Image (spheres, rainbow, N blue to C red):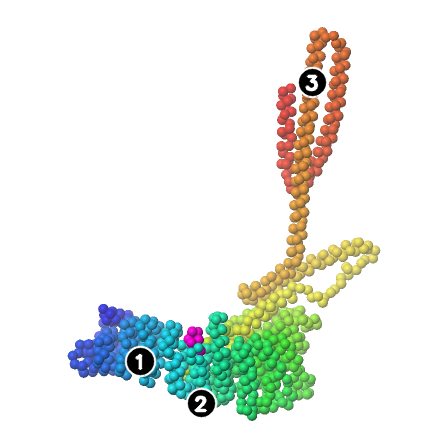
């Protein structure tokens, strides 16, 4: 069933690609007949002859390869599985497989034509049983069977890497059988090496198994046997396999360090025999070994504290094993070494001291040369920077000073202490005489060299080294500020500060660019600008020194708006201007922060100025600034090209006037780009602040502040108070308007980017926040007072409401008493009438007198009580009126509050009257 599936699957693919599943060409029929003879032949010789003919035709014809793929795999697999005793037959079958899987480059055809060999590879790699069968052939005694089997597996790996890696992992002892081939005869061993280099690419599980099978010992044993770096392509294959096992595999690196150590690797770097003899193969071998060193010490793109600690341990062990000596020999002392090797060795030195204080100290103490003429290693590396004709070598050597000075204030101070200017006669001495100079003297000589002939290449390289020495170190910046250089000729005037000389060279580079039209002057400008930006950062004295010469500011303003300058040149010039604002402590008119901002606004325009930052951030140099990236793996296909390094030709850049030099992307590293971004944020905010606060130096006394004739002191103070209040109000409005304008300009300059908008936002709030806070506080106090008054009024209202109810009750009691008196009087009158009618003895005048007396007494008593009651009611009525007015002011509904009062009291009186 497997055989039928294999053939039917292939025929389906062929039909889809070629559109004719039943094609019956002569090659198809010929291949079919040969396969028939192999499968059903009776005579062994006839079957072997058919196998030989099949191999020959498949090796020459794509049509035959296609036909073989459609029909031949089942037949060949049967031969390999069931006819192991017939060595010649198995050999022929394997050789036929190699021919069927190898593309025919010599046969020309359309570019988009499907390659039958690749289809055959895909078909065979799908069958795990076929791979297992091939691996089992590696245990055969016949040399050619093992050799051709390795070739078949290598071709399969070349074209179907992932699938074959997965298949081999599932086969028991599959990798073990391949590793055993490393101990076989030389030809088999070499073929097995090549196969393992393919198998271990980006396959961590396979890498671990290969190492467990003793790969390190076998690799270094073969390298030693082949002669180390002087060996042939086998050494290259061994090192490629070693690099595959170590690349991004921390456990394998630890295993190598803890078992064999790094001694065998360092031994490869030692130069033997004639140190000036470097063949292409030796160059490739050394580059491969240096790549191994790089894999051990350079961390990946992901920040991991555990991996960082592991890399630091590797660096420590390598330096302890004298790796630094061998690297210095390759990079500095061996003048016959190819440029590619020197550059790779310099990069390794840079990486091995990066973030490692002890290794930095070791490098600083290293001396090179013979006993009669020794020189510090850092001096020799500086000489390479100043002398080399290769841009690649300059950049690689410059990286060493970057790594040495980064977060190393002691090292920076040590190098700065040697910066002593030489007399004018020494500065023009031949280059050969700088051997006995100190580091600082050589650096200053490089900074001033080339001024006479207008070639600032050496000056630009020295400026790059100086920028590393000054990076994030205020003491070094202050010390270098005090360096003064003699004028080239006494007639040109007195000595000038080193910073002024650098600005003059910056202007000179601009004129060079307009003359020669090449890109060379462009990167010279950028490196000098990088030095100045680094120097002025967080150093007010450097800003003061820079602004001491008025033409400096004028030139910088012209450079920012110069359309012929590159994007990064304009951007860095804008940053330099911004530093003159944010680190400006001067109070002199024309050199303070206000004057700088005014100059920018008038000569460049704030909108255009802020746009320079965004254009720079989008440029090639800043967008490509990333952490240290791993180098491209060195393989057989890439080795020859990487061994020959070619520098950029300035003439090739002549038509790219507004583009920055591509190699500068390695100099504008992530740290410097972060500094620029931080400075940009501070510059935007500070310019907004400058627009948002008044100039304290301006003080005009208006005439209104003088006391008028005949004006009393009280009126004068009152008028002054009103004037001050008016002025404060106008100032607040102006500050708010200024802040709004500056904020809008910052947003426009930010190109609409949210990050830039955030930098500029909040300026108006900062200006008005105190006023708003004060108003809010006063409003809160007024609200509390009103709440207290309202509570007091409600309490008084409730009290008066209760008092009115009490008075109503008293009035009702008095009314009841009056009614009772009236009833008593009525009863008395009734009795009197009864007595009259009954003929009582009491005389009429006496009764009338008693009645009148009683009525008069009752009236007097009632009137007195009514008068008292009316007085009380009048007082209460005035109180109620006052309370009603106050409640109306507070917004209360008085009618609603008084509704119902007295109604309940009146009802009983009405009832009583009805009863009466």
Horizontal placement of 402 versus 45: left or right?
right
* Residue 619 appearing in the image: no
Residue 160: x %, y % from top left:
33, 74
Residue 227: x %, y % from top left:
40, 87
- At horizontal 62% and vertical 23% (from top left) the residue drawn is 911
Circle 1 is placed at which residue position? Answer: 151
Q: Closer to the N terminus: mark 3 or mark 1?
A: 1
- At horizontal 55% and vertical 86% (from top left) the residue drawn is 367
Asked if the stretch drawn in magenta spans residue 255, the answer is yes
Magenta span dominant secondary structure: helix
Is 712 rendered above or below residue 794?
below
Q: Secondary structure at mark 3?
A: helix
- Residue farthest to the top, as pictured: 839
Which span of residues is magenta-colored?
249-257
Circle 2 is placed at which residue position? Answer: 272
Residue 685: x %, y % from top left:
61, 66
Residue 609: x %, y % from top left:
59, 70
Circle 3 is placed at which residue position? Answer: 824
Q: Secondary structure at mark 2?
A: loop
- At horizontal 61% and vertical 79% (from top left) the residue drawn is 413
Q: Nearer the viewer, residue 846 or 689?
A: 846
- At horizontal 74% and vertical 21% (from top left) the residue drawn is 859
- Residue farthest to the front, as pictured: 259
Crowding near the residue tagged with mark 3, few <14, some 14–19, many ≥20 C-alpha atoms within 10 Å: few
Horizontal placement of 252 versus 807: left or right?
left
């Amino acid at each position: 069933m497997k055989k039928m599936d294999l053939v039917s699957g292939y025929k389906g693919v062929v039909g889809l690609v070629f559109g004719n599943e039943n094609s019956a060409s002569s090659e198809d029929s010929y291949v079919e007949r040969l396969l028939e003879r192999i499968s059903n032949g009776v005579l062994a010789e006839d079957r072997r002859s058919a196998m030989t003919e099949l191999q020959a035709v498949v090796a020459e014809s794509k049509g035959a390869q296609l036909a073989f793929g459609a029909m031949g795999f089942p037949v060949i697999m049967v031969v390999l599985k069931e006819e192991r005793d017939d060595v010649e037959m198995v050999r022929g079958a394997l050789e036929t497989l190699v021919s069927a899987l190898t593309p025919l480059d010599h046969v020309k055809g359309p570019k988009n034509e499907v390659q039958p060999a690749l289809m055959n590879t895909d078909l065979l790699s799908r069958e795990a049983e076929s791979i297992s069968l091939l691996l089992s052939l590696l245990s055969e005694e016949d040399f050619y069977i093992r050799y051709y089997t390795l070739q078949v597996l290598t071709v399969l790996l070349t074209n179907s890497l992932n699938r074959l890696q997965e298949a081999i992992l599932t086969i028991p002892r599959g990798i073990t059988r391949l590793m055993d081939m490393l101990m076989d005869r030389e030809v088999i061993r070499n073929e097995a090496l090549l196969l393992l280099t393919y198998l271990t690419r980006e396959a961590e599980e396979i890498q671990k198994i290969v190492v467990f099978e003793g790969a390190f010992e076998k690799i270094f044993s073969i390298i030693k046997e082949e002669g180390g770096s002087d060996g042939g392509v086998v050494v290259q294959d061994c090192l490629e396999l070693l690099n595959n096992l170590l690349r991004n595999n921390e456990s394998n690196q630890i295993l190598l360090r803890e078992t064999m150590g790094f001694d065998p690797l360092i031994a490869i770097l030692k130069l033997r025999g004639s140190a000036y003899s470097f063949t292409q193969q030796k160059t490739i071998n050394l580059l491969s070994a240096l790549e191994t060193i790089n894999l051990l010490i350079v961390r990946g793109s992901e920040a991991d504290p555990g991996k960082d600690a592991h890399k630091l341990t590797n660096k420590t062990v390598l330096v302890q094993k004298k790796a630094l000596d061998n690297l210095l020999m390759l990079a500095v002392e061996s003048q016959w070494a190819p440029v590619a090797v020197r550059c790779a060795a310099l990069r390794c030195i840079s990486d091995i001291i990066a973030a490692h204080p002890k290794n930095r100290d070791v490098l600083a103490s290293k001396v090179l040369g013979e006993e009669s003429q020794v020189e510090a290693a850092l001096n020799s590396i500086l000489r390479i920077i100043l002398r080399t004709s290769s841009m690649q070598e300059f950049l690689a050597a410059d990286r060493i000073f970057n790594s040495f000075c980064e977060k190393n204030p002691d090292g920076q101070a040590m190098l700065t202490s040697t910066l002593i200017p030489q007399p004018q006669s020494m500065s023009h001495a031949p280059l050969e005489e700088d051997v006995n100079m100190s580091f600082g003297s050589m650096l200053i000589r490089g900074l001033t060299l080339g001024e006479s002939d207008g070639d600032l290449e050496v000056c630009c390289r020295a400026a790059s080294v100086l920028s590393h020495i000054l990076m994030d170190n205020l003491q070094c910046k202050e010390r270098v500020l005090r360096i003064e250089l003699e004028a080239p000729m006494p007639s040109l005037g007195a000595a000038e500060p080193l910073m002024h000389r650098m600005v003059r060279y910056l202007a000179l580079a601009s004129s060079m660019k307009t003359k020669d039209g090449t890109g060379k002057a462009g990167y010279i400008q950028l490196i000098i600008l990088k030095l100045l930006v680094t120097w002025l950062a967080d150093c007010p004295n450097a800003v003061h020194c820079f602004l001491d010469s008025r033409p400096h500011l004028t030139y910088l303003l012209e450079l920012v708006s110069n359309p012929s300058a590159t994007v990064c040149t304009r951007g860095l010039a804008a940053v330099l201007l911004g530093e003159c604002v944010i680190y400006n402590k001067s109070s002199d008119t024309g050199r303070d922060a206000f004057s700088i901002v005014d100059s920018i606004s008038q000569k460049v325009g704030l909108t255009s100025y802020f746009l320079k930052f965004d254009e720079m951030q989008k440029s090639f140099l800043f967008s490509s600034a990333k952490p240290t990236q791993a180098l491209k793996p060195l393989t057989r296909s890439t080795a020859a090209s990487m061994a020959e390094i070619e520098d950029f030709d300035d003439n090739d850049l002549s038509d790219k006037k507004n583009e920055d030099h591509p190699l500068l992307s390695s100099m504008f590293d992530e740290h410097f780009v972060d500094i620029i971004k931080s400075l940009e944020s501070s510059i935007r905010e500070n310019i907004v602040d400058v627009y948002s606060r008044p100039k304290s130096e301006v003080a005009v006394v208006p005439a209104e502040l003088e006391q008028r004739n005949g004006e009393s002191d009280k009126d004068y103070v009152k008028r002054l108070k009103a004037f001050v209040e008016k002025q404060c109000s106008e100032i607040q409005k102006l500050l708010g308007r200024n802040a709004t304008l500056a904020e809008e300009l910052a947003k426009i300059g930010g190109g609409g980017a949210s990050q830039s908008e955030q930098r500029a936002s909040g300026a108006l709030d900062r200006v008005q926040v105190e006023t708003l806070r004060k108003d809010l506080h006063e409003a809160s106090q007024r609200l509390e007072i009103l709440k207290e008054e309202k509570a007091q009024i409600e309490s008084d209202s409730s009290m008066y409401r209760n008092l009115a109810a009490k008075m109503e009750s008293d009035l009702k009691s008095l009314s009841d008493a009056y009614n009772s008196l009236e009833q008593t009087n009525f009863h008395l009158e009734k009795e009197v009438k009864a007595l009259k009618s009954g003929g009582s003895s009491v005389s009429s005048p006496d009764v009338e007198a008693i009645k009148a007396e009683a009525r008069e007494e009752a009236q007097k008593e009632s009137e007195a009580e009514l008068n008292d009651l009316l007085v009380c009611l009048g007082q209460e009525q005035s109180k109620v009126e006052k309370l009603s007015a106050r409640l109306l002011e507070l917004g209360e509904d008085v009618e609603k509050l008084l509704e119902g009062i007295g109604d309940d009291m009146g009802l009983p009186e009405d009832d009583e009257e009805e009863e009466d």
